[in-house]
Image (spheres, grey):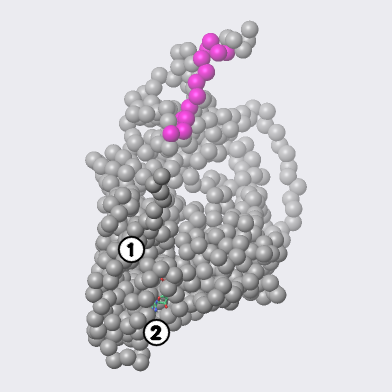
Amino acid sequence: MNSIIHLLPDHVANQIAAGEVVQRPASVVKELLENAVDAQATSITLLVKEGGKTLIQVIDNGSGMGDTDARLSFERHATSKINSAEDLFRLHTKGFRGEALASIAAVSHVEMKTKTEDEDLGSHLIIEGSSVVQQEPCVTPVGTSIAVKNLFFNIPARRNFLKSTTVEQKHVIDEFQRVALVHPSVAFKLIHNGSELFNLPAANHRQRIVGVMGAKTNEKLVPVKEETDLIKLTGFVGKPEFAKKSRGEQFFFVNDRFIKHPYLHHAVSSAFEGLLKDKAYPSYFLYLQVNPQSIDINIHPTKTEVKFDNEHAIYSILRSSVKHSLGQFNVAPVLDFNKDSSMETEYGLHKAKAKIPSIDVDRNFNPFESETKFGKAARPAGASPSRSTANWESLYTEILEDKEDLMDIEVESEQISPSLFQGQATPYQTSGTFQLQRKYIITSTKSEMLIIDQHRAHFRILYEELLKNITAQPALSQQLLFPLKLQLNTIEIRVFKVLKESLINAGFSISEFGEDFVKINGIPNRLPESETSILLDQLLSDFENDIPDSGFDQTDRLAKSLAQSMAIKNGTLLQKEEQTELVNLLFSCKEPMLTPLNRLVFVKQSAADFDKKFM
Ligand code: ADP
Ligand code: MG
């Protein structure tokens, strides 16, 4: 019988093996940067075109390679970094498998120039799909330059699988940042499509973090330091009040490698317990040094997991060190988000003697009528109540004094309410509305009762309005007396540039666009000034990880993000007029049933349902 097993041709085997190392341009970036670091470079430049799809080039001033090494470096399992299996336990380099260059060369066009200090001439190699097509002497500075072109040129399926330039660029930036953050003494540059995104001089850890994450980061950092037999821990955590709405700034480095570790992440998060607002993620940049023998070193090149021998102990050390730092830098005790600020004593009243409240009951007083005046909800979306209940005592007397004015209340509230929801709604025939728990608006039609989630309803209304503004009919904006300056990091600036036009149509006006800041001198009409930076922060983090390519997706995402942040929150008291207006506007929407994120805006109960309940 004929044998059916045969050896795969080299180029096929190489391509298959390459698939494990090279998944996308960012994988190449990681390998090349790490090789440059391993070669003791003090200055590394990364040039990228189209998110790395057409070019990835790394130029370093490291050791360089001689003729023979230059050629050998592209062979599989060719490495200068280990000789024996025991070396794995003494590893101080990033690479050791000798696979990266071979894998990269199997799926791209590579050009390398390299020279050592001892030689006058360097080598120039051109490799295409694993075979060296040219090697000749050349004039080149000490160090190595490797250019990787046309990634996956010979595997169309993988090439087609690559994402848009913006997405691939984001991955490239991620890898660049990870390597740069852990080697502050090396100068790094990143140039994308000819424009310089990062220029990081040699620095200390703190300066490097600030260089990578943006100037505004400096004031947010709290140092962490601990040394035990088990680990040496250094780095920084972000102050809780600056916690981000996205997980963007969380970095663990173990023995100078970026890792992801859900269990250790939990240790850090739990140190922040009680200090963070809802859905906020703490930033951290933590560098752990452990004995290489205490971790599983056989790390796969593309994986970021690592296994520790003493996970539990490391968990405790991490948690308590972070807690300690937050406490020591006076961060922890100052903040207590669980406490209702309205319950705190006014500053000047701290030392005042307690007054005994005099109770003077007015039997004609109707608390429900007074609601409309004192529970003013006619404030911009999301703003906190203007009247603090801390002054409940004076509030109470005011109510009593003002009781003759109760007749005026209706008038006053009518003037205020239209500011909350702008737009012309076709009146929806309701038989009145009612607010339940400052959250639901209850109304009815002929035969049904509707229970509407106020936040979701407003989210839907604003979304449709913003879509219209951005695409067809620019929104009105209010001028700010003092322009708002936002410090932004490289990624945020990029997001801002892409969204600029749409933001202007949504009602923002931008007076200055700097290298690492924008100045905003106008904001959408309904947006309270105090909310602006929070809203933009949220917007940037919504877009940071992935800017949609198509104009439609962009507009849609922007409208969703802005509408969600601007929509009235649950817990906001709404006046009758506002309730009616909300209902009217909702039912003039194209899709009143669902929020833009496809969640139910209201539920219905028919009279027949009630009939059944009362049987
Ligand atoms: P590894 O890094 O696992 O050893 P690579 O395939 O990444 O494997 O690289 C193979 C070898 O090529 C390295 O061990 C190193 O000796 C040499 N090399 C690669 N990049 C550089 C560089 N930028 N400068 C000097 N030598 C390099
Ligand atoms: Mg390597």
Q: Does the magenta stretch include residue 496?
A: no
Q: Position of residue 182 (x, y in %)?
A: 49, 72
Query: Residue 513 at x, y = what percent?
Result: 30, 64
Mark 2 and ligand 1: say if the CB distance to the nearest ligand atom is below 8 Å.
yes
Q: Residues within 10 Å of mark 2 (few under 14, many from 20)?
A: many
Tell me where residue 323 appears, x and y as whole percent: 66, 64
Tell me the kind of residue under disc 2: Ser
Q: Can residue 305 be seen in this view?
A: yes
Give me the residue at 27% from left, 57% from top.
Answer: 154
Asked if residue 40 is positioned above or below residue 17 in the image, the reply reads below
Q: Earlier in the sequence, mark 1 or mark 2?
A: 2
Marker disc for residue 213: none
Provide residue 130's location: percent of width, then percent of height: 31, 66
Is 347 positioned to the left or the right of 98 in the image? right
Measured along the vertical axis of the image, is residue 438 above or below residue 42?
above
Q: Which mark is residue 106?
A: 1
Q: Name the residue under label 2.
A: 63
Question: How far apart are labels 1 and 2 at the CA level?
Answer: 24 Å
Magenta region: which residues? 598-610
Q: Can residue 219 be seen in this view?
A: no
Towards the viewer: 497 or 508: 497
Q: Classify mark 1: residues with Cα within 10 Å, few (<14), some (14-19) or many (20+).
A: many
Q: Would residue 517 be found to the left or right of residue 304 on screen?
A: left
Asked if residue 386 is positioned above or below residue 288 in the image, the reply reads above
Along the line of sight, the residue nearer the viewer: 312 or 282: 312
